[in-house]
């Protein structure tokens, strides 16, 4: 992100947003769906993609979101501090069909707080909402955790596109609002 200084206006900003959460919750596919309207059924998209810059319109202004994907680093518990550096927003993702990924949320929140130098606007994202029969985490359970931790909340499906744009937009809009209040 460009730092708020002098005459800069929010539309000049590049917001760094990070995707975090356990392996295979759908982080890469959420980004692929949002930025390219693509979906990878076999999970081959993760390795190598570092970040993608996406232009968005917030309140009639163009804002750029630079969205970072872990590129599989979390498999080795090796998400580096460089990954978090300068992040102003985060999508903290779990898989509604795997409780273990929901149980990891606290650890991810700790890691986010440890590595970031500011309050990161965060949305808790329950992904794979299309897999209704395999659901292990109810919507209300996700919502309660988000409320308790002061996070935004949404359930998404990278497969059927449900709420994907909305989840990214929620974060970017809030960052924009915070910065607008600071510089205008
Ligand atoms: P990552 O490791 O968190 O980046 O997860 P991936 O994006 O690689 O996805 C892991 C697996 O879950 C892949 O097989 C995806 O096709 C699948 N997947 C991701 N999002 C969804 C979703 O919303 N619905 C369903 N049914 N599968 C998904």
Image (spheres, rainbow, N blue to C red):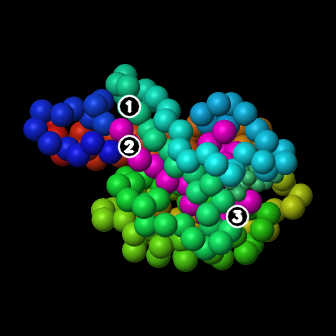
At label 1, counting other C-alpha atoms closer than 10 Å, the crowd grade (few under 14, some 14-19, many 20 or more) is: many
Element type where label 1 sits in the image: strand
Q: Residue at x 49, y 35 (%)?
A: 53
Q: Nearer the viewer, residue 49 or 90?
A: 49
Query: Residues under labels 1 and 3: Cα distance?
Result: 29 Å
The answer to whether residue 140 is seen in the rendering is no
CA separation, marks 2 and 3? 24 Å
The answer to whether mark 2 and mark 3 are in CB contact below 8 A is no
- Looking at mark 3, is its residue's CB closer than 8 Å to ligand 1? yes
* Quadrant of image for the N terminus: top left
Residue 21 is one of the magenta-drawn residues: yes
Residue 170, image x, y percentages: 48, 44
Q: Quadrant of the C terminus?
A: top left
Q: Earlier in the sequence, mark 1 or mark 2?
A: 2
Q: Which residue is mark 2?
A: 15
Q: Residue at x 10, y 38 (%)?
A: 6
Q: Quickly name the residue at label 3.
A: 23
Does 40 sit left or right of 36 as displayed? right
Is 55 in the magenta? Answer: no
- Image-based side of 184 in relation to 88, left or right: left
Q: Are marks 1 and 2 in contact (CB under 8 Å)?
A: yes
Task: Specify the segment rendered in magenta.
Answer: 14-32
As rendered, which of 49 and 178 lies closer to the eye? Answer: 49
């Amino acid at each position: 992100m460009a730092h708020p200084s002098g005459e800069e206006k929010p539309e000049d900003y590049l917001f760094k947003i990070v995707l975090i959460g356990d392996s295979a919750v759908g982080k890469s596919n959420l980004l692929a769906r949002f930025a390219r309207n693509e979906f990878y059924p076999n999970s081959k998209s993760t390795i190598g993609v570092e970040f993608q810059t996406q232009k968005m319109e917030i309140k009639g202004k163009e804002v750029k979101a630079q969205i970072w994907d872990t590129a599989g680093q979390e498999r080795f518990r090796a998400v580096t501090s460089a990954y978090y550096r300068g992040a102003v927003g985060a999508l903290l993702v779990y898989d509604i069909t795997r409780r273990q990924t929901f149980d990891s949320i606290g650890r991810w929140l700790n890691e986010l707080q440890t590595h970031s130098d500011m309050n990161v606007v965060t949305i808790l994202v329950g992904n794979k909402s299309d897999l209704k029969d395999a659901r292990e985490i109810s919507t209300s359970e996700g919502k309660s955790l988000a409320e308790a931790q002061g996070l935004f909340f949404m359930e998404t499906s990278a497969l059927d596109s449900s709420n994907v744009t909305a989840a990214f937009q929620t974060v970017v809009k809030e960052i924009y609002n915070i910065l607008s209040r600071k510089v205008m």
